[in-house]
Image: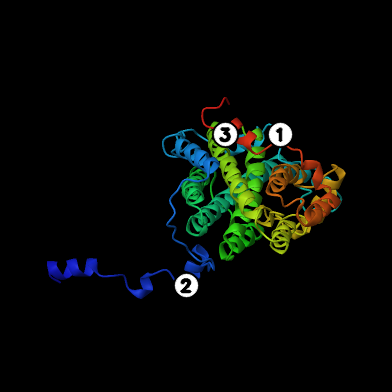
Protein backbone atom coordinates (compact mmCIF):
# COMPACT_ATOMS: atom_id res chain seq x y z
CA UNK A 1 0.00 0.00 0.00
CA UNK A 2 1.34 3.43 -0.98
CA UNK A 3 1.71 6.34 1.45
CA UNK A 4 -1.29 8.01 -0.22
CA UNK A 5 -3.42 4.90 0.17
CA UNK A 6 -2.35 4.55 3.82
CA UNK A 7 -3.36 8.15 4.48
CA UNK A 8 -6.75 7.60 2.87
CA UNK A 9 -7.31 4.45 4.91
CA UNK A 10 -6.50 6.32 8.11
CA UNK A 11 -8.96 9.06 7.23
CA UNK A 12 -11.77 6.69 6.24
CA UNK A 13 -14.77 6.32 8.57
CA UNK A 14 -14.67 3.25 10.81
CA UNK A 15 -16.29 0.08 9.59
CA UNK A 16 -19.79 -0.66 10.86
CA UNK A 17 -18.54 -3.42 13.12
CA UNK A 18 -16.16 -0.94 14.78
CA UNK A 19 -19.06 1.22 15.99
CA UNK A 20 -20.71 0.62 19.35
CA UNK A 21 -23.46 -1.98 19.11
CA UNK A 22 -27.06 -0.97 19.84
CA UNK A 23 -27.08 -2.61 23.27
CA UNK A 24 -24.02 -0.60 24.30
CA UNK A 25 -25.58 2.60 22.95
CA UNK A 26 -28.80 1.91 24.83
CA UNK A 27 -26.80 1.60 28.04
CA UNK A 28 -25.17 4.98 27.44
CA UNK A 29 -28.03 7.13 26.16
CA UNK A 30 -31.79 7.51 26.46
CA UNK A 31 -33.78 9.31 23.80
CA UNK A 32 -36.50 11.57 25.24
CA UNK A 33 -39.19 13.23 23.12
CA UNK A 34 -40.05 16.79 24.15
CA UNK A 35 -43.56 17.85 23.13
CA UNK A 36 -43.23 21.56 23.98
CA UNK A 37 -43.31 24.21 21.27
CA UNK A 38 -40.22 26.44 20.96
CA UNK A 39 -40.84 30.16 20.78
CA UNK A 40 -38.81 33.14 19.58
CA UNK A 41 -39.36 36.46 21.39
CA UNK A 42 -39.44 39.91 19.80
CA UNK A 43 -39.91 41.82 23.07
CA UNK A 44 -36.51 42.51 24.66
CA UNK A 45 -37.75 44.95 27.31
CA UNK A 46 -36.41 44.18 30.80
CA UNK A 47 -39.81 44.48 32.49
CA UNK A 48 -39.38 42.21 35.53
CA UNK A 49 -36.95 43.86 37.94
CA UNK A 50 -36.83 40.96 40.42
CA UNK A 51 -35.77 38.58 37.68
CA UNK A 52 -33.23 41.14 36.46
CA UNK A 53 -31.75 41.26 39.98
CA UNK A 54 -31.67 37.47 40.18
CA UNK A 55 -30.01 37.25 36.76
CA UNK A 56 -27.34 39.75 37.87
CA UNK A 57 -26.68 37.68 40.99
CA UNK A 58 -26.36 34.57 38.84
CA UNK A 59 -23.93 36.27 36.47
CA UNK A 60 -21.81 37.55 39.37
CA UNK A 61 -21.95 34.22 41.20
CA UNK A 62 -20.48 32.01 38.47
CA UNK A 63 -17.68 29.79 39.75
CA UNK A 64 -15.25 27.52 37.95
CA UNK A 65 -15.17 23.85 38.90
CA UNK A 66 -11.64 23.52 37.54
CA UNK A 67 -9.98 26.44 39.35
CA UNK A 68 -12.18 27.17 42.38
CA UNK A 69 -11.98 23.64 43.78
CA UNK A 70 -8.74 22.03 44.92
CA UNK A 71 -8.75 18.67 43.14
CA UNK A 72 -5.31 17.83 44.53
CA UNK A 73 -6.88 17.03 47.92
CA UNK A 74 -6.50 13.35 48.75
CA UNK A 75 -9.82 11.71 49.61
CA UNK A 76 -9.99 8.61 51.79
CA UNK A 77 -13.49 7.05 51.37
CA UNK A 78 -13.17 4.93 54.52
CA UNK A 79 -12.21 7.96 56.57
CA UNK A 80 -15.12 9.92 55.06
CA UNK A 81 -17.57 7.20 56.07
CA UNK A 82 -16.11 6.98 59.57
CA UNK A 83 -15.85 10.69 60.37
CA UNK A 84 -19.24 12.09 59.37
CA UNK A 85 -20.63 14.50 61.95
CA UNK A 86 -23.67 12.22 62.24
CA UNK A 87 -23.57 8.62 61.00
CA UNK A 88 -25.71 7.94 57.96
CA UNK A 89 -29.16 6.79 59.15
CA UNK A 90 -29.09 3.82 56.78
CA UNK A 91 -25.88 2.63 58.42
CA UNK A 92 -27.42 3.05 61.89
CA UNK A 93 -30.45 1.03 60.83
CA UNK A 94 -28.17 -1.63 59.32
CA UNK A 95 -26.33 -1.86 62.64
CA UNK A 96 -29.69 -2.52 64.31
CA UNK A 97 -30.68 -5.04 61.63
CA UNK A 98 -27.49 -7.05 62.22
CA UNK A 99 -28.81 -8.12 65.62
CA UNK A 100 -32.27 -9.22 64.44
CA UNK A 101 -32.97 -12.98 64.41
CA UNK A 102 -32.65 -14.40 60.89
CA UNK A 103 -31.15 -11.22 59.46
CA UNK A 104 -29.32 -11.78 56.16
CA UNK A 105 -26.60 -9.40 57.39
CA UNK A 106 -26.18 -11.04 60.81
CA UNK A 107 -22.53 -11.85 60.01
CA UNK A 108 -21.63 -8.24 59.24
CA UNK A 109 -18.95 -6.48 61.26
CA UNK A 110 -17.29 -3.07 61.14
CA UNK A 111 -15.68 -3.72 57.75
CA UNK A 112 -19.00 -4.37 56.03
CA UNK A 113 -20.73 -1.47 57.77
CA UNK A 114 -17.94 0.90 56.72
CA UNK A 115 -18.20 -0.31 53.13
CA UNK A 116 -21.97 0.20 53.29
CA UNK A 117 -21.34 3.80 54.33
CA UNK A 118 -19.06 4.28 51.32
CA UNK A 119 -21.60 2.73 48.93
CA UNK A 120 -24.39 4.93 50.30
CA UNK A 121 -22.24 8.01 49.74
CA UNK A 122 -21.46 6.92 46.17
CA UNK A 123 -25.14 6.22 45.52
CA UNK A 124 -26.18 9.65 46.84
CA UNK A 125 -23.57 11.49 44.79
CA UNK A 126 -24.56 9.44 41.73
CA UNK A 127 -28.17 10.61 42.05
CA UNK A 128 -26.92 14.18 42.47
CA UNK A 129 -24.94 13.80 39.23
CA UNK A 130 -27.86 12.32 37.27
CA UNK A 131 -30.30 14.84 38.72
CA UNK A 132 -28.07 17.75 37.75
CA UNK A 133 -27.93 16.54 34.16
CA UNK A 134 -31.72 16.32 34.20
CA UNK A 135 -31.88 19.85 35.62
CA UNK A 136 -29.57 21.04 32.84
CA UNK A 137 -31.94 19.61 30.23
CA UNK A 138 -35.04 21.08 31.88
CA UNK A 139 -33.39 24.50 32.26
CA UNK A 140 -32.48 24.40 28.55
CA UNK A 141 -36.12 23.59 27.81
CA UNK A 142 -37.21 26.63 29.83
CA UNK A 143 -34.85 28.82 27.79
CA UNK A 144 -36.67 27.70 24.64
CA UNK A 145 -40.24 27.82 25.94
CA UNK A 146 -40.72 30.54 28.59
CA UNK A 147 -42.44 33.62 27.08
CA UNK A 148 -40.51 36.33 29.00
CA UNK A 149 -37.03 37.52 28.05
CA UNK A 150 -35.96 38.12 31.67
CA UNK A 151 -36.86 34.53 32.59
CA UNK A 152 -35.13 33.28 29.45
CA UNK A 153 -31.91 35.10 30.36
CA UNK A 154 -31.95 33.63 33.85
CA UNK A 155 -32.74 30.09 32.65
CA UNK A 156 -29.67 30.31 30.42
CA UNK A 157 -27.48 30.99 33.47
CA UNK A 158 -29.12 28.08 35.25
CA UNK A 159 -28.34 25.78 32.33
CA UNK A 160 -24.66 26.67 32.80
CA UNK A 161 -24.95 26.16 36.55
CA UNK A 162 -26.39 22.68 36.10
CA UNK A 163 -23.73 21.75 33.56
CA UNK A 164 -21.06 22.77 36.05
CA UNK A 165 -22.77 20.79 38.83
CA UNK A 166 -22.97 17.69 36.65
CA UNK A 167 -19.29 18.09 35.79
CA UNK A 168 -18.01 18.41 39.37
CA UNK A 169 -20.14 15.58 40.78
CA UNK A 170 -19.03 13.29 37.94
CA UNK A 171 -15.40 14.22 38.49
CA UNK A 172 -15.60 13.74 42.25
CA UNK A 173 -17.14 10.30 41.81
CA UNK A 174 -14.69 9.23 39.10
CA UNK A 175 -11.48 10.54 40.70
CA UNK A 176 -12.20 10.21 44.43
CA UNK A 177 -14.74 7.44 45.08
CA UNK A 178 -15.05 5.04 42.13
CA UNK A 179 -17.91 3.62 40.09
CA UNK A 180 -21.15 5.57 39.95
CA UNK A 181 -24.60 4.08 40.39
CA UNK A 182 -27.35 4.21 37.73
CA UNK A 183 -30.12 6.78 37.93
CA UNK A 184 -32.85 5.71 40.34
CA UNK A 185 -36.17 4.83 38.64
CA UNK A 186 -38.01 7.38 40.80
CA UNK A 187 -35.74 10.25 39.80
CA UNK A 188 -35.61 9.12 36.17
CA UNK A 189 -39.39 9.01 35.89
CA UNK A 190 -39.72 12.47 37.42
CA UNK A 191 -37.15 14.10 35.16
CA UNK A 192 -38.29 12.41 31.95
CA UNK A 193 -41.91 13.44 32.60
CA UNK A 194 -40.84 17.07 32.90
CA UNK A 195 -38.84 16.96 29.69
CA UNK A 196 -41.70 15.30 27.79
CA UNK A 197 -44.50 17.56 29.05
CA UNK A 198 -45.75 20.17 26.60
CA UNK A 199 -46.39 22.86 29.25
CA UNK A 200 -43.43 25.09 30.08
CA UNK A 201 -44.73 25.94 33.55
CA UNK A 202 -44.90 22.25 34.50
CA UNK A 203 -41.17 22.00 33.79
CA UNK A 204 -40.74 24.98 36.13
CA UNK A 205 -42.98 23.51 38.82
CA UNK A 206 -41.49 20.05 38.75
CA UNK A 207 -37.86 21.11 38.55
CA UNK A 208 -37.55 24.53 40.21
CA UNK A 209 -39.99 23.84 43.03
CA UNK A 210 -40.11 20.07 43.64
CA UNK A 211 -36.80 18.57 42.49
CA UNK A 212 -34.70 21.59 43.50
CA UNK A 213 -36.31 21.40 46.96
CA UNK A 214 -35.30 17.73 47.10
CA UNK A 215 -31.80 18.74 46.05
CA UNK A 216 -31.50 21.47 48.68
CA UNK A 217 -32.59 19.04 51.39
CA UNK A 218 -30.16 16.35 50.21
CA UNK A 219 -27.21 18.68 49.63
CA UNK A 220 -27.77 20.46 52.94
CA UNK A 221 -27.91 17.20 54.87
CA UNK A 222 -24.71 15.94 53.27
CA UNK A 223 -22.93 19.26 53.84
CA UNK A 224 -23.83 19.30 57.54
CA UNK A 225 -22.33 15.83 57.98
CA UNK A 226 -19.31 16.16 55.68
CA UNK A 227 -15.80 16.56 57.03
CA UNK A 228 -13.89 16.14 53.75
CA UNK A 229 -12.87 19.67 52.61
CA UNK A 230 -13.22 19.25 48.84
CA UNK A 231 -16.74 17.86 49.10
CA UNK A 232 -17.73 20.53 51.62
CA UNK A 233 -16.67 23.37 49.34
CA UNK A 234 -18.23 21.73 46.28
CA UNK A 235 -21.56 21.32 48.06
CA UNK A 236 -21.46 24.86 49.40
CA UNK A 237 -21.10 26.29 45.90
CA UNK A 238 -23.83 24.05 44.51
CA UNK A 239 -26.31 24.92 47.28
CA UNK A 240 -25.89 28.65 46.64
CA UNK A 241 -26.78 28.07 42.99
CA UNK A 242 -29.72 25.80 43.77
CA UNK A 243 -31.29 28.22 46.24
CA UNK A 244 -31.20 30.85 43.52
CA UNK A 245 -32.89 28.42 41.11
CA UNK A 246 -35.79 27.86 43.51
CA UNK A 247 -36.20 31.62 43.87
CA UNK A 248 -36.37 31.84 40.07
CA UNK A 249 -39.21 29.33 40.00
CA UNK A 250 -41.15 31.12 42.73
CA UNK A 251 -40.83 34.53 41.05
CA UNK A 252 -41.86 33.30 37.61
CA UNK A 253 -44.67 30.95 38.57
CA UNK A 254 -46.27 33.33 41.07
CA UNK A 255 -46.91 35.74 38.22
CA UNK A 256 -48.10 33.09 35.78
CA UNK A 257 -50.39 31.23 38.20
CA UNK A 258 -52.20 34.44 39.14
CA UNK A 259 -53.92 34.29 35.72
CA UNK A 260 -54.73 30.57 35.49
CA UNK A 261 -58.24 29.16 35.81
CA UNK A 262 -59.34 27.06 38.78
CA UNK A 263 -59.19 23.92 36.62
CA UNK A 264 -55.65 24.72 35.49
CA UNK A 265 -54.55 25.40 39.05
CA UNK A 266 -56.08 22.14 40.26
CA UNK A 267 -54.09 20.30 37.62
CA UNK A 268 -50.90 21.83 39.08
CA UNK A 269 -52.04 20.98 42.60
CA UNK A 270 -52.54 17.36 41.55
CA UNK A 271 -49.01 17.33 40.13
CA UNK A 272 -47.74 18.33 43.56
CA UNK A 273 -49.84 15.64 45.24
CA UNK A 274 -48.42 13.03 42.86
CA UNK A 275 -44.90 14.19 43.67
CA UNK A 276 -45.47 14.04 47.43
CA UNK A 277 -48.09 12.06 49.36
CA UNK A 278 -49.26 10.00 46.37
CA UNK A 279 -45.75 8.70 45.72
CA UNK A 280 -44.06 7.27 48.79
CA UNK A 281 -41.66 4.89 47.01
CA UNK A 282 -38.75 7.26 46.53
CA UNK A 283 -35.59 5.23 46.78
CA UNK A 284 -34.94 2.04 48.68
CA UNK A 285 -31.38 1.93 47.24
CA UNK A 286 -31.59 -1.73 46.11
CA UNK A 287 -28.44 -1.27 44.00
CA UNK A 288 -26.43 -0.48 47.14
CA UNK A 289 -27.48 -3.72 48.78
CA UNK A 290 -26.88 -5.67 45.57
CA UNK A 291 -23.35 -4.27 45.41
CA UNK A 292 -22.94 -5.39 49.03
CA UNK A 293 -24.02 -8.89 48.03
CA UNK A 294 -27.44 -8.70 49.73
CA UNK A 295 -30.81 -9.23 48.03
CA UNK A 296 -34.27 -7.75 48.68
CA UNK A 297 -34.77 -10.11 51.61
CA UNK A 298 -32.97 -7.51 53.74
CA UNK A 299 -35.72 -4.88 53.42
CA UNK A 300 -38.19 -6.33 55.97
CA UNK A 301 -35.34 -6.43 58.49
CA UNK A 302 -34.39 -2.83 57.72
CA UNK A 303 -38.01 -1.78 58.18
CA UNK A 304 -38.17 -3.53 61.55
CA UNK A 305 -34.83 -2.01 62.58
CA UNK A 306 -36.03 1.46 61.58
CA UNK A 307 -39.18 0.99 63.65
CA UNK A 308 -37.08 -0.03 66.65
CA UNK A 309 -35.10 3.17 66.26
CA UNK A 310 -38.29 5.21 66.12
CA UNK A 311 -38.19 6.37 62.51
CA UNK A 312 -37.86 5.44 58.86
CA UNK A 313 -34.76 5.13 56.71
CA UNK A 314 -35.19 8.61 55.25
CA UNK A 315 -37.35 10.43 57.83
CA UNK A 316 -34.83 13.24 58.42
CA UNK A 317 -34.34 13.87 54.72
CA UNK A 318 -38.08 13.85 54.02
CA UNK A 319 -38.69 16.43 56.75
CA UNK A 320 -35.99 18.68 55.27
CA UNK A 321 -37.55 18.29 51.82
CA UNK A 322 -41.00 19.39 52.97
CA UNK A 323 -39.48 22.24 54.95
CA UNK A 324 -38.19 23.58 51.62
CA UNK A 325 -41.21 22.67 49.49
CA UNK A 326 -44.27 23.71 51.50
CA UNK A 327 -43.34 27.39 52.08
CA UNK A 328 -42.53 27.85 48.39
CA UNK A 329 -45.78 26.25 47.25
CA UNK A 330 -47.64 28.63 49.58
CA UNK A 331 -45.91 31.57 47.86
CA UNK A 332 -47.20 30.31 44.51
CA UNK A 333 -50.78 30.45 45.75
CA UNK A 334 -51.23 26.74 45.14
CA UNK A 335 -51.69 25.84 48.79
CA UNK A 336 -54.98 27.77 49.07
CA UNK A 337 -56.25 27.75 45.48
CA UNK A 338 -59.55 25.95 44.81
CA UNK A 339 -60.84 26.51 48.35
CA UNK A 340 -57.72 25.07 49.94
CA UNK A 341 -57.71 21.83 47.93
CA UNK A 342 -53.99 21.21 48.46
CA UNK A 343 -53.95 22.65 51.98
CA UNK A 344 -56.61 20.16 53.05
CA UNK A 345 -54.75 17.16 51.65
CA UNK A 346 -51.32 18.19 52.84
CA UNK A 347 -52.84 19.02 56.21
CA UNK A 348 -54.27 15.51 56.51
CA UNK A 349 -50.79 14.17 55.76
CA UNK A 350 -49.25 16.35 58.49
CA UNK A 351 -47.27 18.53 56.09
CA UNK A 352 -48.62 21.92 57.15
CA UNK A 353 -46.27 21.96 60.12
CA UNK A 354 -43.61 22.93 57.59
CA UNK A 355 -45.51 25.96 56.29
CA UNK A 356 -43.62 28.38 58.52
CA UNK A 357 -40.15 26.93 57.80
CA UNK A 358 -37.28 29.23 56.82
CA UNK A 359 -37.47 30.86 53.41
CA UNK A 360 -35.31 29.35 50.65
CA UNK A 361 -33.67 32.77 50.36
CA UNK A 362 -31.94 31.97 53.66
CA UNK A 363 -30.07 29.16 51.91
CA UNK A 364 -28.76 31.54 49.29
CA UNK A 365 -27.60 34.07 51.89
CA UNK A 366 -26.00 31.35 54.03
CA UNK A 367 -24.11 29.50 51.30
CA UNK A 368 -23.39 32.30 48.83
CA UNK A 369 -19.80 32.50 47.63
CA UNK A 370 -17.91 34.72 50.05
CA UNK A 371 -20.21 33.99 53.00
CA UNK A 372 -18.54 32.78 56.19
CA UNK A 373 -18.15 29.02 56.42
> Mark 2 — residue?
22
Image-based side of 94 in relation to 259, left or right:
right
Relative to 248, residue 34 above or below: below
**Quarter-of-image position of residue 18:** bottom left
Q: Say which quadrant the N terminus sits in.
A: bottom left
Q: How far apart in space, not on screen, are marks 3 and 2 (Cα)?
A: 39 Å
In this rendering, the label closer to the viewer, 1 or 3:
3
Residue 209 visible in image: yes
- Image coords of residue 38 (percent x, y): 48, 64
Asked whether 207 or 51 is in front, the reply is: 51
Instruction: Give how far apart the Cα atoms at labels 1 and 2 are.
Output: 45 Å
Q: Secondary structure at mark 3?
A: helix
Q: Which is nearer the eye, 264 or 20?
A: 264
- Tell me what residue is drawn at x 68 percent, y 37 percent: 359
Please tell me how crowded label 2 is: few (under 14), some (14-19), or many (20+) other residues with Cα within 10 Å.
few
The disc placed on residue 232 is 3
Give how far across and how far down residue 268 sits, in percent.
69, 59
Residue closest to the far bottom: 16
Residue sitting at x 61%, y 34%: 79
Amino acid sequence: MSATESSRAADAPPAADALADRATMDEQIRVVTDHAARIFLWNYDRSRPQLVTLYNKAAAGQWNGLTDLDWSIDVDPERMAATQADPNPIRLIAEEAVSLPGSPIASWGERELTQLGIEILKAQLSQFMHGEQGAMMVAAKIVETVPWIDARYYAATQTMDEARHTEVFARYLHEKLGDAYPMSPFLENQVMALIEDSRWDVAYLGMQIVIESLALAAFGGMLRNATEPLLKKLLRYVIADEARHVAFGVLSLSEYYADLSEAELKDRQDILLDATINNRARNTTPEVWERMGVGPEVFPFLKEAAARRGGSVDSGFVANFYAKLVPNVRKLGLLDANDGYLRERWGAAGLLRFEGSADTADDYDTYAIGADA
